[in-house]
Image: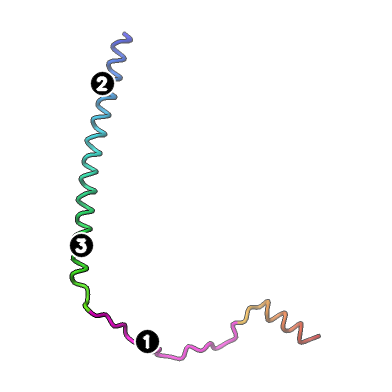
Amino acid sequence: MKQRKKDFSTSVADEVEKSVKEKSAKVENFVRKALDSFEELIYQLVAIRPKEYRPRDFTPTRDFTPTRDFTPRDLKKRESRDNNK
C-alpha cells in the first residue's frame, strides 16, 4: 500500500514538473518575441525622428502677475504683531 501511494505521489510530482517546464518555455519565448518587437519599434522610431528640432518660443497669452498677495498666513500674523508693538 505504501509503495503504491509513493509511486502515485512521484508521478504527480513528475507531471507538475513537466507542466511547469512547458509553461516556462512558452513564457520565455513570448517574452523574447515581445522584446524583439519592442527593439524593432525603437529602431523605427529612431529612424523617423525629425532631423532638426526647434522648440517654439513661448509667448504668454495673458499677464501672469498675481492678483492677490500669496504670503503665508503665519508670516502675515507675525508681521501684524510686529507692526502693533
| Residue type beneath disc 1 | Phe
Residue at image coords 25%, 39%: 24
Give the spatial CA distance, label 3 vs label 2: 45 Å
**Mark 1–mark 2 contact, CB under 8 Å?**
no
Between residues 69 and 10, which one lies in front from this camera angle? 10
- Tell me the quarter of the picture where residue 79 sits: bottom right
**Spot occupied by residue 22 in the image (x, y as percentages of width and height):** 22, 35
| Residue type beneath disc 3 | Leu
| Residue type beneath disc 2 | Ser
Q: What residue span does the magenta drawing correspond to?
A: 52-70
Horizontal side of 27 relative to 77 (left or right) equals left
Height in image: 62 above or below 38? below
Q: Which residue is mark 3?
A: 41
Q: Nearer the viewer, mark 1 or mark 2?
A: 1
Return the disc, 3 or 2, that comes first in the chain's sequence: 2
Q: Which residue is mark 1?
A: 58
- Tell me the quarter of the picture where residue 14 sits: top left
